[in-house]
Amino acid sequence: RRSRALDTEWTTFLDSGSGCAVATPVGDFNSTVDSSCGGLVVSEGLDVRSVGAGAEAGSDIRLGFGIANNSWVVGRVTDNVALFDHLLEAEMWIVRRGGAYVQQFL
């Protein structure tokens, strides 16, 4: 379930612990989030930096997988699509801001 209205801007990522696609409102560190596995609760450890309504193309992004394994994903915003390189597993993530959507490239 979602804790915010559908027009809320969402940051999406793949939870490497559960393998679920997860969406959380940008900048909201304590929220119930959407998940392909039926819903997760982000209570701590999620660190979203430089991602929001004002993020411009080329700006740096950092998402923290603090809950799952304390690893980091670092990428750059290109339009409304952010490309992330998972530093530990060398996987690419596409994150579309503004919707709960994640695609994984192995």
Image (tube, grey):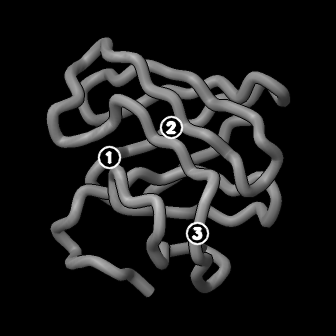
Q: Given this view, does label 2 or label 3 mark the residue nearer the observer?
A: 3
Q: Mark 2 points at which residue?
A: 94
Secondary structure at badge 2 equals strand
Whether residue 100 is visible, yes or no, is no
Q: What residue type is labelled 1?
A: Arg
Q: Where is residue 61 in the image (x, y as percent from the top left)?
A: 44, 26
The residue sitting at 38% across, 81% down in the picture is 2
Q: Position of residue 100 (x, y in %)?
A: 41, 62
Q: What residue type is labelled 3?
A: Ser
Q: Position of residue 79 (x, y in %)?
A: 24, 26
Quick check: 24 left or right of 21?
left
On-image quarter of the C terminus: top right
Q: Mark 3 points at which residue?
A: 43
Q: Name the residue under label 1.
A: 97
Secondary structure at badge 3 equals loop
Residue 90 vertical position relative to residue 12 in the rendered view, above or below: above
Q: Given this view, does label 2 or label 1 mark the residue nearer the observer?
A: 1
Q: Given this view, does label 3 or label 1 mark the residue nearer the observer?
A: 3
Q: Which of marks 2 and 3 is nearer the N terminus?
A: 3
The residue sitting at 38% across, 59% down in the picture is 28
Q: Where is residue 33 in the image (x, y as percent from the top left)?
A: 48, 73
Q: Image quadrant of residue 21? A: bottom right
The residue sitting at 75% across, 22% down in the picture is 87
